[in-house]
C-alpha cells in the first residue's frame, strides 16, 4: 500500500489497495467465509471494471497472492482480462522483503490507520506468519510456481525493498518497468 501511494504520486494513477475491499465486508462477514470471499472479489472486480472504463491514467491494485495456488492465479487472470478486454495493459510489480521487516511494517501507523483489521496486532502478526509459512509469495529462479505463466505474459519487475523506503521503491519501479 505504501509503495502504491508513492507510485500514484509519481504517475497520477489511483490506488486500490486490497483492504479497500476487505475492510467494509469484515464488518458483516468473518474473514475467509464464503460470503466474505464472494463480496470482496465482486467488489474488486467492479472497481477494476469501472476504472478500466474510466478516463484514468492508471490504477495500482495491491494484492497478497499465493503464487502456487491455481485459484489465486485464475482470479488475478480474470482481473487482467477485464483490463485487456477494455484495451488496457497490465504490469506486475512483485515486492519482497525479509520477514522481520514485514513484521515491522505490519505495525506502522499508516497501515493501522488505513487497514483497521490490522489493529488487532496479535491476529495480524499471526496471519502474516501463517501466510509466510503456508504460501509462496515470490517468484524464484529455483522454483517455478503456477502464477509464472500469467506473470511472464506481462511486463514484470521484482524488487527486494527490505532496505528501501516506499518512495525509493516507487522510483525504482518507474526506472525499471518497461514503458
Image (cartoon, rainbow, N blue to C red):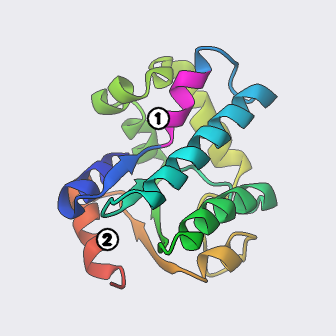
Mark 1, secondary structure of its residue: helix
Q: Residue at x 36, y 29 (%)?
A: 114
Q: Which residue is mark 1?
A: 20
Q: Give the numbered dot on residue 124.
A: none
Question: In this view of the protein, can residue 120 be seen by the observer?
Answer: yes
Q: Is residue 19 magenta?
A: yes
Q: Characterize the local packing of mark 2: few (<14), some (14-19) or many (20 or more) Cα atoms within 10 angstroms.
A: many
Mark 2, secondary structure of its residue: helix
Q: Is residue 160 above or below residue 48?
A: below
Q: Residue at x 28, y 62 (%)?
A: 169
The x and y percentages for residue 163 are 30, 58
The x and y percentages for residue 57 are 30, 64
Question: Which quadrant holds residue 136?
Answer: bottom right
Q: Residue at x 22, y 58 (%)?
A: 12
Start-end of magenta stretch: 18-25
Q: Is residue 125 above or below residue 49?
A: above
Q: Residue at x 66, y 75 (%)?
A: 150
Q: Is residue 26 magenta?
A: no
Q: Quadrant of the N terminus?
A: top left
Q: Which residue is mark 2?
A: 173
Depth-wise, is mark 2 or mark 1 nearer the camera? 1
Amino acid at each position: 500500500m505504501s509503495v502504491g501511494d508513492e507510485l500514484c504520486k509519481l504517475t497520477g494513477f489511483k490506488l486500490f489497495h486490497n483492504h479497500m475491499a476487505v475492510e467494509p465486508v469484515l464488518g458483516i462477514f468473518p474473514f475467509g467465509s464464503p460470503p466474505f470471499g464472494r463480496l470482496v472479489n465482486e467488489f474488486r472486480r467492479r472497481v477494476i471494471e469501472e476504472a478500466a472504463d474510466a478516463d484514468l491514467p492508471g490504477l495500482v491494485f495491491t494484492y497478497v497472492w499465493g503464487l502456487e495456488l491455481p485459484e489465486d492465479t485464475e482470479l488475478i487472470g480474470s482481473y487482467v482480462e477485464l483490463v485487456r478486454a477494455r484495451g488496457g495493459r497490465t504490469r506486475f510489480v512483485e515486492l519482497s522483503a525479509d520477514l522481520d521487516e514485514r513484521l515491522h511494517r505490519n505495525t506502522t501507523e499508516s497501515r493501522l490507520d488505513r487497514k483497521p483489521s490490522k489493529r488487532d496486532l496479535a491476529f495480524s502478526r499471526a496471519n502474516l506468519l501463517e501466510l509466510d509459512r503456508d504460501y509462496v509469495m515470490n517468484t524464484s529462479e529455483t522454483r517455478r510456481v503456477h502464477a509464472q505463466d500469467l506473470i511472464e505474459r506481462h511486463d514484470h519487475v521484482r524488487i527486494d525493498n527490505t532496505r528501501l523506503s516506499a518512495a525509493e521503491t516507487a522510483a525504482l519501479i518507474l526506472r525499471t518497468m518497461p514503458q
